[in-house]
Image (tube, rainbow, N blue to C red):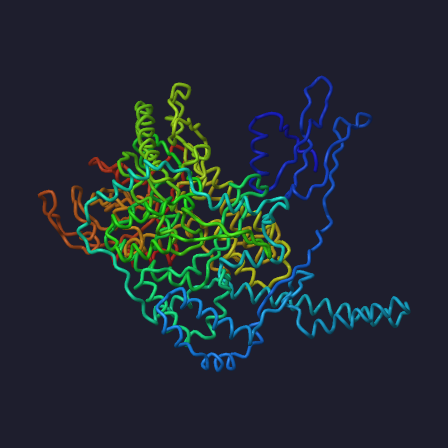
């Protein structure tokens, strides 16, 4: 609290700067009335209350102080009382004390051949579960455990015994408060605190070192560290009505469904071989069982921890059940039941649509789904049946590859003095509205065999679900539509379901799971026509949604016009037609959030840098409790798991940031270094960065950029070159030294303006393929014979640079890099890096150059 000498009642540059700084530090300004009253001047708001967690504020306000000051007095009170932990009773199996040898001996005495004697899949699954439960009820029975306090796994038996002695000494001192009793109690208390602190330090260190990045946050939240999200449900929430909402399908017009089915059945049969589900082998089943790391327990009460000790014995039995399911086209009924855990999408959910259903399925059902998913995915990739620009749930694809394509297409339009109309569509409960009959018809249209289609029909129909909150369950509801969120096959089936959603549209587009975005580029004069063209494409998408029974939420759909400042100022917004979806006008936005990245109308990246800063300060603030508690090695692991991913996410998408923004990112990286070594604000970090062997931000970005390029060139699962790259064989010249010209073969990648240059001296007019230039061979192109290269003159000229931003220069013979090849330049001042790079970047460049 204090006087900041900046009036927030004014919308000037000074107030905007203060708000930006406060927001980037993940702080919040509490609302207040004017606090400064000077005679003959308007009231102003100068005194502010800035906090990090507004939810902990009990009361705040202000009092007038006319007698001695022009400023009001501010007050604020915090909620300092920690909430009381409610006791819970859990039914758990103690696998740690289980005798595995005795378990295996008893398992060998069970008559497992009873499973082979029946051909009914449901009966086989029932017998398997009964035998497994019989074994574990004997060797690791369920026991009720009452949790009065948060779990403390670092408390050993020695520490608990010492705590008992401490409590006895304390009681003795209270009964007889003499110096001898007090000294005994003090020694035991200090020793107990030291042992608890050391044991907790060792436990945190070991857990973080052994955990993967996905589990680090979960562990930190268990310690009360990190951004706390209120996952508790309101006490008045009706579980039955919530389950009805999750299980209800979208309103579907029957004539639309019949028309869609007739259209799908009338499609010609593809000319490639049909998909047939093949039997699985023991090694595949064993490999997939060990690959799944989730310990969630489904409705059958069989967990991963119950399968692994008997894996060698159970693998042949499970394989026979899986193959019987594939041969008969029957999915086990017991494995269709799902327990739903509703997670709030926001801190204070007000309606059922603010909850996200997460399905907890049986463990063995996930293994069978994984095996089928692997076969189906191979069939789709071999025949290119998935949408080319679908980046969701595909190996080698990610949100970053999707953003790379979109952002560089926008940059290319800005270079050509065009504006881009970007429309982000939001589907409402997309996974829950998939119609079973239409999905099966789509599978048949891509040549899935009738036997495999029968298996998918059995997989989809007859499913049930219930809501589970701790020990409370709702009643069961049948599902008429939707693929389970949490199933292994669900993402792939949904991608197949909407594979043709973009058929017939003229705009560019990209998909990531159920996130669809379309964009078109045009000159400023043809912008109204481009808006009408976008509306026509949205009408086609709306017709698809109506035919297939999925729904788009117009209230969450966003539209933004992106271009240079000069072009945007020429737009007459009051006469520009609106982008409409299903007769709903969508207002134009200044900033949109696209797959976690904030994109503004001028691609200045200021909102994105501010968002990164806000997340970094929030993460560092949450780690303050551990700052003086952990060894440096654990802090480094925390920085790699939590802090650096914030800086690294999609960093290759905004390579054209200004030097000021780059310096801000460097300071945020320095914040991580200060956390690791416990440095103060103004301590130098250069030597500590060298000790960590961390690269500066711009070099880290180059490494990520080169890694993506390497995967595109040599990883068959990554996006193809045609998706991200524009081929080019143009050779241009640049003046490197006075009186000497170097002729570069430039190739622009569509992902961020990667400029690949091979330092070969050529004369003007030499045009050859990139592979010929890199190998030093000569070739004929455009009717001319290329002359042999001149001798190399300097070591710097032999270096191959990649990912280096160069400012295009004009040559005397009309050189320069054309728009199709040039490094993109946004309208504002941008950062241009020199060709000097780190050794690892240069070595990777040379390696890629030799391989390509």
Residue 388 percent location from the top left of the image: 28, 46
Name the residue located 71 percent from the left edge and 51 percent from the top edge: 82
Taking depth in this image into account, of 683 and 710 the one nearest to the observer is 710
> To which quarter of the image does residue 414 belong?
top left
Name the residue located 20 percent from the left edge and 56 percent from the top edge: 273
Name the residue located 38 percent from the left edge and 44 percent from the top edge: 403
**238 left or right of 296 in image:** right
Picture mark count: 0
Depicted 476 relative to depicted 6: above or below = below
Residue 93 percent location from the top left of the image: 57, 69
The quarter of the rendered structure image containing the N terminus is top right
Depicted 500 relative to depicted 12: above or below = below
Name the residue located 69 percent from the left edge and 61 percent from the top edge: 148
The quarter of the rendered structure image containing the C terminus is bottom left
Depicted 636 relative to depicted 605: above or below = below
- Looking at the image, which residue sits at the far left? 783
Taking depth in this image into account, of 470 and 211 the one nearest to the observer is 470
Residue 95 percent location from the top left of the image: 55, 72
Residue 204 percent location from the top left of the image: 59, 64
Q: Is residue 105 visible?
A: yes
Depicted 534 relative to depicted 612: above or below = above
Q: Is residue 411 visible?
A: no
> To which quarter of the image does residue 487 belong?
bottom left
- Looking at the image, which residue sits at the far top? 40
């Amino acid at each position: 609290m204090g006087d900041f000498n900046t009036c927030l009642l004014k919308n000037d540059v000074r107030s905007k700067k203060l708000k930006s700084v406060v927001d980037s530090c993940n702080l919040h300004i509490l609302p207040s009335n004017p606090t400064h009253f000077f005679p003959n001047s308007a009231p102003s708001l100068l005194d502010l209350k800035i906090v990090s967690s507004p939810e902990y504020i009990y009361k705040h306000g202000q009092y007038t102080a006319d007698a001695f000051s022009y400023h009001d007095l501010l007050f604020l009170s915090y909620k300092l009382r920690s909430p009381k932990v409610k006791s819970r009773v859990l039914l758990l199996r103690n696998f740690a004390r289980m005798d595995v040898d005795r378990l295996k001996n008893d398992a060998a005495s069970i008559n497992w051949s009873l499973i082979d004697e029946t051909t009914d899949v449901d009966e086989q699954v029932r017998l398997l579960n009964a035998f497994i439960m019989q074994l574990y009820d004997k060797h690791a029975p369920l026991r009720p455990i009452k949790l009065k306090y948060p779990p403390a796994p670092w408390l050993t038996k020695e520490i608990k015994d010492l705590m008992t002695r401490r409590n006895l000494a304390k009681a003795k001192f209270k009964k007889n408060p003499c110096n001898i009793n007090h000294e005994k109690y003090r020694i035991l208390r200090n020793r107990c605190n030291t042992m608890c602190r050391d044991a907790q330090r060792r436990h945190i260190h070991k857990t973080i070192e052994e955990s993967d990045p996905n589990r680090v946050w979960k562990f930190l939240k268990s310690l009360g560290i990190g951004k706390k999200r209120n996952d508790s449900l309101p006490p008045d929430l009706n579980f039955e009505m919530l389950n009805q909402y999750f299980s209800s399908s979208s309103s579907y017009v029957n004539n639309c469904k019949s028309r869609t089915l007739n259209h799908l059945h009338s499609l010609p049969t593809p000319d490639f071989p049909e998909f047939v589900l093949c039997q699985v082998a023991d090694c595949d089943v064993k490999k997939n069982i060990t690959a799944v790391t989730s310990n969630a327990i489904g409705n059958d009460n069989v967990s991963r921890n119950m399968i692994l000790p008997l894996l060698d014995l159970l693998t042949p039995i499970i394989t026979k059940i899986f193959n019987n399911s594939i041969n008969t086209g029957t999915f086990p009924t017991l494995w269709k039941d799902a327990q739903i855990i509703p997670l709030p999408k926001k801190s204070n959910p007000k309606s059922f649509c603010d909850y996200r259903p997460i399905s907890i399925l049986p463990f063995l059902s996930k293994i069978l789904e994984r095996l089928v998913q692997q076969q189906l995915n191979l069939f789709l990739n071999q025949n290119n049946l998935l949408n080319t620009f679908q980046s969701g749930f595909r190996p080698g694809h990610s949100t970053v590859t999707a953003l790379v394509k979109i952002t560089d297409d926008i940059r290319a339009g800005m270079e050509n003095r065009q504006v881009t109309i970007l429309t982000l569509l939001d589907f409402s409960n997309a996974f829950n509205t998939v119609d079973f009959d239409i999905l099966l018809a789509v599978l048949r249209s891509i040549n899935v065999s009738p036997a495999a289609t029968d298996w998918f029909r059995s997989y989809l129909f007859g499913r049930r679900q219930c809501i589970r909150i701790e020990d409370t369950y709702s009643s069961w509801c049948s599902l008429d539509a939707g693929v389970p969120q949490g199933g292994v096959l669900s993402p792939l089936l949904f991608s197949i379901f909407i594979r043709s959603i973009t058929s017939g549209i003229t705009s560019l587009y990209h998909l990531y799971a159920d996130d669809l975005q379309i964009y078109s580029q045009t000159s400023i004069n043809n912008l109204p026509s481009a808006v009408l063209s976008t509306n026509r494409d949205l009408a086609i998408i709306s017709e698809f949604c109506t035919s297939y029974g999925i729904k788009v939420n117009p209230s969450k759909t966003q539209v933004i016009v992106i271009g240079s400042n000069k072009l945007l100022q020429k737009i007459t917004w009051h006469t520009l037609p609106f982008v409409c979806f299903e007769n709903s006008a969508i207002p134009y936005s200044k900033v949109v959030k696209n797959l976690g990245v904030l994109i503004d109308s001028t691609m200045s990246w200021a909102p994105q840098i501010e968002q990164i800063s806000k997340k970094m300060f929030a993460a560092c603030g949450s780690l303050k409790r551990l700052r003086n508690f952990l060894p440096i090695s654990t802090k480094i692991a925390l920085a790699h798991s939590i802090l650096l991913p914030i800086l690294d996410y999609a960093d290759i998408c905004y390579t054209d940031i200004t030097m000021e923004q780059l310096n801000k990112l460097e300071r945020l990286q320095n914040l991580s270094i200060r956390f690791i070594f416990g440095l103060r604000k103004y301590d130098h970090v250069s030597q500590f960065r060298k000790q960590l062997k961390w690269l500066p931000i711009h070099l880290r970005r180059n490494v990520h950029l080169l890694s993506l390029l390497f995967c595109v060139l040599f990883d068959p699962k990554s996006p193809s070159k045609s998706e991200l790259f524009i081929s080019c064989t143009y050779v241009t010249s640049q003046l490197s030294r006075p009186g000497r010209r170097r002729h570069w073969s430039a190739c622009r990648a569509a992902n961020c303006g990667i400029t690949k240059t091979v330092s070969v001296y050529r004369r003007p007019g030499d045009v050859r393929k990139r592979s010929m230039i890199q190998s030093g061979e000569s070739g004929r192109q455009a009717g001319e014979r290329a002359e042999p290269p001149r001798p190399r003159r300097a070591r710097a000229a032999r270096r191959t640079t990649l990912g280096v931003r160069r400012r295009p220069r004009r040559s005397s013979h009309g050189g320069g890099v054309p728009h199709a090849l040039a490094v993109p330049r946004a309208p504002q001042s941008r950062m241009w890096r020199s060709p000097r790079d780190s050794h690892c970047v240069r070595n990777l460049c040379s390696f890629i150059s030799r391989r390509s």
